[in-house]
Image (cartoon, grey):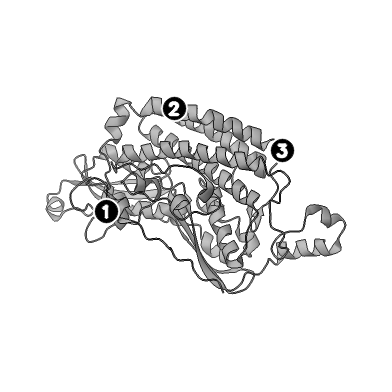
Amino acid sequence: MAVASRRTSAIDPAVLRAPEIYPGSHIPDPIPTILLVEPRLRESEDILQVNFGPNHPSTHGVLRLVVDLNGETVVGLRAIIGYLHTGFEKNMEQKTWWKAITYPERIDYVAFQNNELVFVLAIEQLLDMEIPPKAAWMRTLLCELNRIHSHLIWLATSALELGAIALFWYGFRERERILDLFELVGGTRMHTRYFQTGGLAEDIPPGFFPECRAFTERMPSSIDEYETLLTRNEIWLQRTVGIGKLSAQDAVAMGQSGPVLRASGVDWDLRRDEPYLTYGDIDFDVPVYTGGDVYHRYRVHMDEMRQSVRIVDQCLDRLEGMEGEPWITDDRRVVLPPRDELHTSMESLIHHFKIVTEGYRVPEGEIYATVESPRGELGCYVVSDGGPKPWRVKFRTPSFVALEATATCMTDALVADFIAIVGSLDTVMGEADR
């Protein structure tokens, strides 16, 4: 019987020793996720309550933020979610393990490969299944391409909201090239369902390696272009430096992860600290900054794109020497028979039909699988009762947790800084609402 995995290593206190960003804590009291207007201000009758949303532009999804303003200063904030509730987790509990794989991709439609991966990893851990090395390296490569894809959308939209419209076009230019690679591999540009239990849906197609290599050769100069436009831009600096501060202590207390956590000075990344797939065999750095503001979250995102290019290059070096190796396990309990057998073997045809229609059975047990998604720690808790469907599915989504820190980051913020702060937390409302 499988049991939920437990972390073997606690966070070293050394990773929390960032310079003090501000004295004490800015977490609101008594409700940590809601910034309440002070009674003396409320009594002054100078408070204006404004609705931001629910609309997609500027709130990175269908998010409603009820903001209390005293002049141009934000003195109250309450985030209201649920406008994009889809019931994905309950839908997955009504589908077979084989069919449920298509759902996680749509929870975070920007980081679709990482969401697909965490559910597949949970199934494989319950099955106690090892995947071929070729599949592990290809999964790593695609997850890092997906990380760059997600960061590009974040950069393009966040810059656009602060008036840097050129970054929107530049960011989507490279995003299209990444989507071309996903289409080459899986046949679709998004929601590829390329990760299957036991490995990959298909072998790596001819022509993928030179196209991907051409992308990694071009991408560093593209990142240089982005930084030339923004990193020392006086307007960008005025709109981001010292805005939306979040200390390391508050970030940990609020359960933050990913770029938000590392921009506050906490050196923690699951790819390095709790390696999965092939990350333990890859040389890469974890960008960490100590400013804890909008600007340093931007810097973390930029540096992470550079590191992802390094990781993709190393994956290509290994994969190019694996031609002819298996790309999926040969465990016929869960893997579809090879396509060429369907024309000659009635047993294989029946087996294919039964897996697709009835599904396969997963041993009774529970598991919590985690990956480092572009937004931070993405977890999937799965319970199996031994049947062909998950008994319980629950995702720990970093966007939902990041929204909890919104009120903390708004201390002493002006309404003009409001959108910059919300955007810097990199939330996707499909992931927050589920």
- Residue 194 versus residue 88 in the image, above or below: above
**Mark 3 Cα-neighbour bin, 10 Å: few <14, some 14–19, many ≥20:** few
Question: Residue at horizontal 43%, vertical 63%?
Answer: 7
Please give the residue where the numbered disc 3 appears in the rendered image. Answer: 206
**Mark 1 Cα-neighbour bin, 10 Å: few <14, some 14–19, many ≥20:** many
Alpha carbon separation for disc pair 3 and 2: 30 Å
SS of the residue under disc 1 = helix
Viewer-nearest residue: 380 or 129: 129
SS of the residue under disc 3 = loop
Q: Which mark is residue 249?
A: 1
Q: Which quadrant of the structure image shows residue 418? A: top left
**Is residue 345 left or right of 113 when viewed as pictured?**
right
- Residue 26 versus residue 424 in the image, above or below: below
Alpha carbon separation for disc pair 1 and 2: 32 Å
Question: Residue at horizontal 66%, vertical 37%?
Answer: 208
Question: The N terminus lies in which quarter of the figure?
Answer: bottom right
Alpha carbon separation for disc pair 3 and 1: 49 Å
Q: Amino acid at mark 3?
A: Pro
Please give the residue where the numbered disc 2 appears in the rendered image. Answer: 224
| x and y, in percent, of residue 377 in the image | 43, 54
Residue at the right extreme? 344
Q: Is residue 83 visible?
A: no
Viewer-nearest residue: 176 or 20: 20
